[in-house]
Image (cartoon, rainbow, N blue to C red):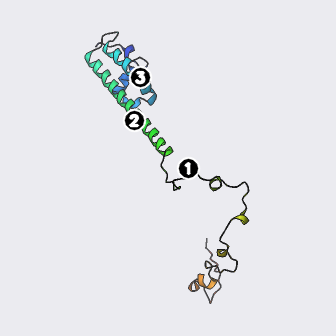
């Protein structure tokens, strides 16, 4: 066979390509990012030592898997950027008059001190004399059939050992 163990070892220039061809699940993103496809294909096509045809086919399979994985990573990164840009430049509905180019400062800025007495509130709604419709009498909220009348209201329960 026409290959060298040092040529395909894990730290060798084509070791990652060999791993991508046969043990793709062992590679991480950093392994894929460190491979320069053009120079690696040049190493395969014009090797320093003779390579068997089957070996070069396996290495080219590894190169195609590395290229495919790099495209997947690029697609994922582009989608993340596209989603981020769409969040930043989201369209909002603005209902300003056509002649207005900017809102007045008083409409968009809170005052230095907030004076509730100066604000125009609907005071008629919040009167102390108004009845509260959210409270019921104890007779309305108590279940009378659950209270024992002839016995003591509290029942003592004991457990024997």
Residues packed near mark 3 inside 10 Å, few (<14), some (14 to 19) or many (20 plus): some
Q: Nearer the viewer, mark 3 or mark 1?
A: 1
Q: Position of residue 36 (x, y in %)?
A: 40, 21
Viewer-side label of 3, 2: 2
Label for residue 101? 1
- Circle 2 SS class: helix
**Residue nearest the viewer, comparing 20 with 75:** 75
Which residue is found at the position 62% from the left and 85% from the top? 139
Disc 3 versus disc 2: distance between alpha carbons? 18 Å
Q: Residues within 10 Å of mark 1 (few under 14, many from 20)?
A: few
* Secondary structure beneath label 1: loop
Outermost residue toward the left in this view: 53
Q: Which residue is mark 3?
A: 35
Along the line of sight, which residue is nearer the eye, 44 or 124? 124
Q: Quadrant of the C terminus?
A: bottom right
Q: Residue furthest bottom?
A: 150
- Classify 10 Å Cα crowding around label 2: few (below 14), some (14-19), many (20 and above): few
Which residue is denoted by mark 2 in the rendering?
Answer: 75
Which numbered disc flags the more N-terminal residue, 3 or 2? Answer: 3
Q: Secondary structure at mark 3?
A: loop
Residue 86 position within the rendered picture, expressed as x and y whole percent measured from the top left: 46, 44
The answer to whether residue 159 is above or below residue 23 is below
Q: Nearer the viewer, residue 71 or 12?
A: 71
Comes first in the chain, label 3 or label 1:
3
Indicate whether 46 appears above or below 138: above
How far apart marks 3 and 1 lie (CA) works out to: 53 Å
* Residue at left offset 65%, top offset 55%: 106
- Counting from the top left corner in percent of width and height, residue 58 is at 30, 22
Q: Position of residue 87 (x, y in %)?
A: 49, 45
Q: CA distance from mark 2 to mark 1?
A: 40 Å
Residue name at image x 41 percent, y 29 percent: 27
Marks 3,1: beta carbons within 8 A: no
């Amino acid at each position: 066979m026409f290959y060298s163990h040092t040529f395909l070892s894990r730290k060798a220039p084509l070791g990652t390509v060999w791993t991508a061809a046969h043990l793709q699940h062992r590679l991480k993103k950093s392994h894929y990012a460190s491979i320069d496809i053009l120079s690696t294909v040049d190493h395969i096509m014009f090797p320093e030592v003779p390579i068997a045809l089957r070996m070069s086919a396996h290495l080219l399979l590894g190169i195609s898997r590395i290229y495919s994985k790099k495209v997947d990573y690029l697609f994922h990164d582009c989608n993340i950027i596209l989603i981020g840009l769409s969040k930043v430049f989201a369209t909002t509905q603005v209902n300003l008059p056509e002649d207005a180019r900017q809102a007045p400062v008083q409409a968009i800025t809170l005052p230095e001190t907030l004076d509730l007495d100066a604000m125009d509130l609907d005071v008629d709604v919040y009167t102390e004399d108004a009845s509260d419709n959210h409270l019921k009498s104890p007779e309305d909220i108590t279940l009378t059939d659950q209270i024992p009348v002839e016995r003591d209201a509290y029942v003592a329960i004991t457990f024997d050992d």
